[in-house]
Image: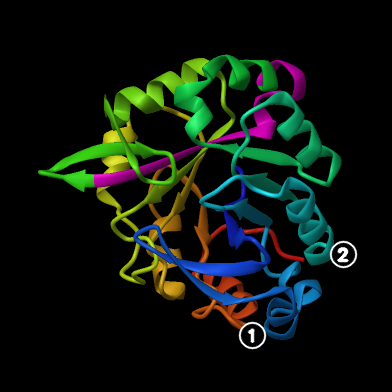
Amino acid sequence: MAKKRLIFTLLYQKGGFYLSRNFRLQKIGNLSWLKINYNFYSVACAIDELVILDVSREKPDRQEFCEVVNEVCQNCFMPLALGGHINSLDDAKMLIYNGADKLIINTALHENPNLVRELIAIYGSQCIIGSVDYKIEEGSFIVYTNQGKKRLDRPLNEHIERLGEMGVGELYLNSIDRDGTGQGYVSEVLKQLDSASHLPIIQAGGAGNKHHLQESLECRGVDAVATANLLNFVGDGLPKAREFLINKGISMAIW
């Protein structure tokens, strides 16, 4: 049985790192702030993977983003997933060249599926994470793209089925409603996916404490939890969260 994973997500835009609440961004600090508050050599011992997303609302500076990625990951040895504005093969190649083990793709899944298929053919399914942002509207799970601005007229389970047919390796399932609220993950969404896909699921959006991480990892179908909450897990928050999860019997790698 595969081990469960704890993933930390950083949201980056034009020189700064951000908190997100319902996809509204608030700048927390720059690279210097991040280094002061997060010892990434220590963090690397607490998480299974690091995700860094370029959430720029305008055209991103890809070179600057890659320089920041290299600075953050200096002397850290852990799987790295990068995403945000992957609109071409060249975009993907640049992120892979700068250390990405996996690529996180969202809008292109809908707007440019041929690009996604090409990336899968080149790098393999295990390299491609399909990112799915959703809201609950009138009791239904609705998919959104373009940083939560564009509503898809397609049920969530149908969208997930298409991603499986496309060949993505796993899902990054992110609740816009719970994003940044610290109220916990949306467990109900997992029932929608039970028959739609057998892809590994990374659940994101809503973690406020270690108990939320535990509750999600104990759900059938959840392979990993991700948190982008820079303030709730500052300092030794992530190492303590991992220790707590292992002590609660969650099957995780022990180093």
Residue 101 is labelled as: none
- Please tell me in which quadrant of the rendered image residue 123 appears: top right
Q: How crowded is mark 1: few (under 14 residues within 10 Å), some or many (20 or more)?
A: some
Q: Mark 2 points at which residue?
A: 74
Does residue 199 appear to the left or right of 237 in the view shown? left
Residue 56 coordinates in the image, percent (x, y): 56, 53
View extreme (left): residue: 138
Q: Can residue 195 be seen in this view?
A: no
Residue 204 coordinates in the image, percent (x, y): 45, 54
Give the residues in magenta: 120-135
> In the image, which is nearer the foreground, mark 1 or mark 2?
2
Q: Is residue 207 above or below residue 111?
A: below
Magenta stretch: includes residue 50 = no
- Please tell me in which quadrant of the rendered image residue 18 appears: bottom right
Q: In this view, does 151 lie above or below 153?
A: below
Does residue 203 appear to the left or right of 195 in the view shown? right
Q: Mark 1 points at which residue?
A: 235
Q: Which of 218 and 24 is in front in this view?
A: 24
Residue 187 coordinates in the image, percent (x, y): 30, 52
Q: In this view, does 38 lie above or below 20?
A: below
